[in-house]
Image: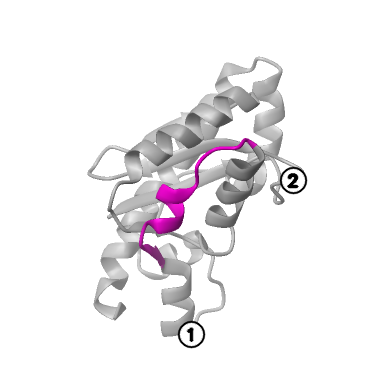
């Protein structure tokens, strides 16, 4: 299993870019930030080199992360085969199909399972932080990286809870 989370500058890949790609294979999340298209290219190539044969575990990844990454890879003319061929597990779909909750955001589901994170930011904050990082604000970029790492760790903890419900 390899956990994947991305942060983006917009919700549509033709209007934004990947700001950070985070992967968590064992205990320590790795995040590759991107401010320029060249940074984005390097982050996508780094991700391709790390995927291997592992199952990619995401939250809403089949609807957002994977299509966004594939779109950006196509735009930058980067090979998408490692991402396309890797087995995938979208925990959002597992939870939505298994549990009857009022909200299916990663944080809401984590709260339901008693997993509480202290991260004050959400993905909606990332475009603003990205603009600050573009203007040279190193602290803003650190916040994006910290948020991505936090989401990866939260994703892994939620996965532990829902494993018994996965076919």
State the mark number for residue 100: 1
Q: As drawn, is 96 to the left or to the right of 18?
A: left
Q: Residue at x 62, y 44 (%)?
A: 74
Q: Mark 2 points at which residue?
A: 14
- The quarter of the picture where the N terminus appears is bottom left
* Above or below 95: residue 137: above
Of circles 2 and 1, the one toward us is 2
Quarter of the figure with residue 167: bottom left
* Residue 40 image point, x, y percent: 57, 30
* Residue under the image location 47 percent in, 41 percent down: 148
Instruction: Name the N-terminal-most of marks 2 and 1.
Output: 2
Task: Name the image quarter holding residue 125.
Answer: top right
Residue 99 visible:
no
Task: Give the vertical position of 118 relative to 61 (above or below).
Answer: above
The crowding category of the residue bearing disc 1, from other C-alpha atoms within 10 Å (few below 14, some 14 to 19, many at least 20), is few
Q: Which residue lies furthest to the right in this view?
A: 15
For this rendering, which residue is in front, 150 or 12?
Answer: 12
Q: Is residue 107 among what the camera can see?
A: yes
Q: What element carries label 1?
A: loop
In this picture, which residue range is highlighted in magenta? 76-90
Q: Is the residue 128 above or below the residue 97 in the image?
A: above
Q: Residue 13, image x and y in percent?
A: 69, 47
State the separation of the CA atoms marked 2 and 1.
34 Å
SS assignment at label 2: loop
């Amino acid at each position: 299993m390899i956990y994947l989370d991305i942060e983006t500058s917009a919700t549509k890949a033709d209007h934004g870019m990947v700001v950070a790609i985070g992967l968590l294979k064992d205990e320590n999340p790795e995040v590759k930030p991107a401010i320029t298209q060249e940074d984005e290219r390097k982050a996508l190539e780094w991700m391709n080199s790390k995927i291997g044969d592992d199952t990619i575990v995401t939250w809403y990844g089949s609807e957002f992360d994977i299509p966004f990454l594939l779109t950006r890879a196509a735009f930058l003319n980067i090979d998408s085969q490692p991402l396309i061929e890797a087995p995938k597990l979208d925990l959002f779909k597992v939870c939505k199909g298994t549990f009857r909750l009022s909200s299916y955001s990663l944080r809401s589901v984590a709260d339901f399972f008693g997993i509480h994170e202290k991260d004050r930011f959400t993905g909606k904050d990332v475009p603003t932080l990205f603009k600050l990082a573009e203007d040279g604000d190193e602290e803003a970029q650190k916040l994006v990286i910290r948020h991505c790492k936090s989401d990866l760790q939260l994703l892994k903890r939620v996965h532990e809870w829902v494993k018994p419900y996965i076919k």
